[in-house]
Amino acid sequence: MKVPVPLKKASVASLLRTPHFASRMPSVPTVDQIMAEERATAFTKRSIKTSTKLAGLKMVVSMMDLTTLEGKDTPGKVAYLCRKALQPADPKYAVPPCAAVCVYPNMVRYARRFLGDNSPVHVASVATAFPSGQFPLRTRLEEVRRAASDGADEIDMVINRCAFLAGDHAKVFDEIASVKEACGPAHLKVILETGELVTYDNVRLASEIAMQAGANFIKTSTGKVSPAATLPVTLVMLEAIRDYFFATGIRIGMKPAGGIRNAKQALAYLVMVKETLGDDWLTPDLFRFGASTLLNDVLMQTAKTVDGNYQGPDYFSLP
Amino acid sequence: MKTKHKAVFRRVSAKRAVAKVASLPIVPLKERRLTFGNRWDYVPAPEDSKNYVIAPRHELFINGRFVPPSTGKHFDSSNPANEEKLTEIALGGEQDVDRAVKAARRAYERVWSKMSGRERGKYIYRIARIIQEKARELAVLETMDGGKPIKETRDVDLPIVAAHFFYHAGWADKLRYAFPGRNPRPLGVAGQIIPWNFPLLMAAWKIAPAIACGNTVVIKPSKTTSITLLRLAQIFQEADLPAGVVNVVTGTGETGTAIVKHPDVNKIAFTGSTEIGKQLAQLCAGTGKRLTLELGGKAANIVFDDAPIDQAIEGIIAGIYFNMGHVCCAGSRLLVQESIFPTVVRKLRDRIQTLRIGNPLDKNTDIGAINNKPQLEKIRALVQSGADEGAEVVQPVCKLPERGYWYPPTFLTGVTASHRIAQEEVFGPVLAVMTFRTPEEAVERANNTPYGLSAGVWTDKGSKIFKIVNQLRAGVVWANTYNKFDPTSPFGGYKESGFGREGGVQGLAAYCRQD
């Protein structure tokens, strides 16, 4: 039987060998754990005060994918979430809406109904057997198609960690590419689940595979595995995005998710983006936070910065 | 059949996906750059300095008391970040040095050398704790006096200063275990001369091991940075350190020479320029005085093509721009494997654009002021020589403050080993970037310098690290990191970088007689 030119296993290798990497430089650079962590810590040392803090907090809200991913999610819960995303705080604080709500595929239609068609808040859906990904590709792709046709603007898929850790990087690549195809016009965020990849070298390689395979965003975690997003892991991914930009001219987005619970942490992430990728990435189009409890802490800090005093948690509506 | 179907399926989907990616906006090659602008800028965040008052005049610290100098003269000490006068410092003369040495001798013979190691240790522990308690104040003073960013004085200088006193306090009653089978005894009076780049840290490096071993000290800070050492003298008073154990004589180079020439000094320890070091070596020759010198450097930072590249960039930055490059072990010669040279230069270009230059008291400042005017002029002259000899000078787009001494972080490409900028120590934020092709060449070029204080190696391959570091003639070699200091680790140089070690057991040996 006539088989077309084999692209199967060679696909990643050949794609990674772009002209940019044509020199003796290894196709994917290695990462030194100690220095990467030291650099990440340095971003937390920036002193963010007054007007910088206020502008930063509002930017954080505008970059937030407000998330609920629980078995007990209902249309009612999704309505709470959507309203909160549209109007996070009292209008006097001039806080922008969140970037998106992030829900399970079954909740997409409710979110879409609540938000309407031209909402400033996007609908993002996790898919591909989130969070484990341990399901047949066929059903995973079906999930993606359904979520997209139900009205999801963005699909957050998980990579096949089983294949990745077993060394079948080509399979990881091909699956991401298939999901990208199934997304249609929807944007694709690729969750690496860095807590299961463990080493920064793995994170760097997985980032490269995801970007090459068609990701619009790369995302750290599902939030269901600990550790979720950390500063150093995000830094390693930002550095991968930076190299990819210089190699291809394409700007890939970044989304740390899970584990970012307070405003101070979130501002440290902004500092890192500002000083690693620069102004062009300081936009919800290219940087997102996946979070739920973070939002009200950011709002409390916003109110404190504006009014000069702290309010109790009951002064901020629950999502 | 099934597998074949799968193969076709994967191929098609991958192709379409890549096509879709290709339809994303692609920035043309020439426009691919990062913008480090002010979409979200940091407002100034100055460390509060108004609670720390600097006395209008500082006297000499001799025999446990602050006394005016015999010369009757004082000189001005100013803040290099704005050229404002901070205080007046006593100009110590030969008579003052003699008084200080006599006080030190008396304290050595009557008190300090007779005291048990355990008792000495108690005093040193107490000093270390007071330093920790006053760390913020000392950091602010150090920043105002020397132009160093508060981020560094707060997070690097002061913690290591305290660590040196703690570490050596621990040795005070355990010297016999440091030199098994020997009978370590103190030398007597140690004359110590320290530079302006790490005023308090160098004082700690010198004083802590000396007094832990039972010696007494006459120490002279650099003319431009005396304030923190005199504040440390107050801490010695608070700690009830017996009078005369540590004496501080401020002044100029002549004051230092007087210490070195004094016949009743048993040991000289100097950190500073190679030129002065050579003069001191001549003065000490034949006198029986022990001498340790920690002098200049022109360290090679070697980056192989298999290095963790983004972390290596951080190491290069830390290696040369830490403390405005006023570091004797600064990694001022970057040796990059030629195959990754363009990538490294591109990344360095972006990285120096994110360094923040300005008010050293601002907590977000990465690069502070150049310590003094002659040094600024020297840096300018050397960079100019590089440009004249055909190198390309790369500097960030940044505004420098109008007053004070400032120089932007700089690197030069197109440099060869025959450029002046590749041979002479700049002692400023200036990096000479050169290339190599093979590990052998890297080692040969790294060693091709009259200095030999430090070096750095960046590679992901452990075996390569061990092979290279054993061939480098440098006192300290860092692998996949740079500018890391710890009191347990000896520090010192080869060749024109001096002799003797500071820190660790080896550092103690410089302050003990072991016969």
Image: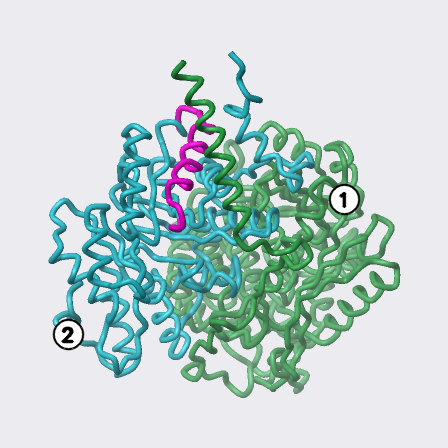
Q: Name chain B's colour.
A: green
Q: Disc 2 is attached to a residue of which chain? A: A
Q: Disc 1 is attached to a residue of which chain? A: B
Q: Position of residue B316 (x, y in %)?
A: 62, 51
Question: In this orientation, which residue lies closer to the viewer: A120 or B347?
Answer: A120
Q: Residue at x 77, y 54 (%)?
A: B413
Q: Position of residue B105 (x, y in %)?
A: 58, 62
Question: In this orientation, which residue lies closer to the viewer: B105 or B510?
Answer: B510
Q: On screen, B28 above or below B104?
A: above
Q: Secondary structure at mark 1?
A: strand
Q: Is residue B83 left or right of residue B158?
A: right
Pointer 2 and pointer 1: residues touching (CB < 8 Å)?
no
Q: Residue at x 31, y 41 (%)?
A: A144
Q: Which chain is cyan?
A: A
Q: Is residue B512 visible?
A: no
Q: On screen, B8 above or below B377?
A: above
Residue A306: which disc? none
Magenta residue span: A165-187
Q: Is residue B382 visible?
A: yes
Q: Is residue B379 left or right of residue A112?
A: right
Residue A315: which disc? 2
Q: Residue at x 24, y 55 (%)?
A: A67
- Is-magenta flag for residue A173? yes
Mark 1 lies on residue: B435
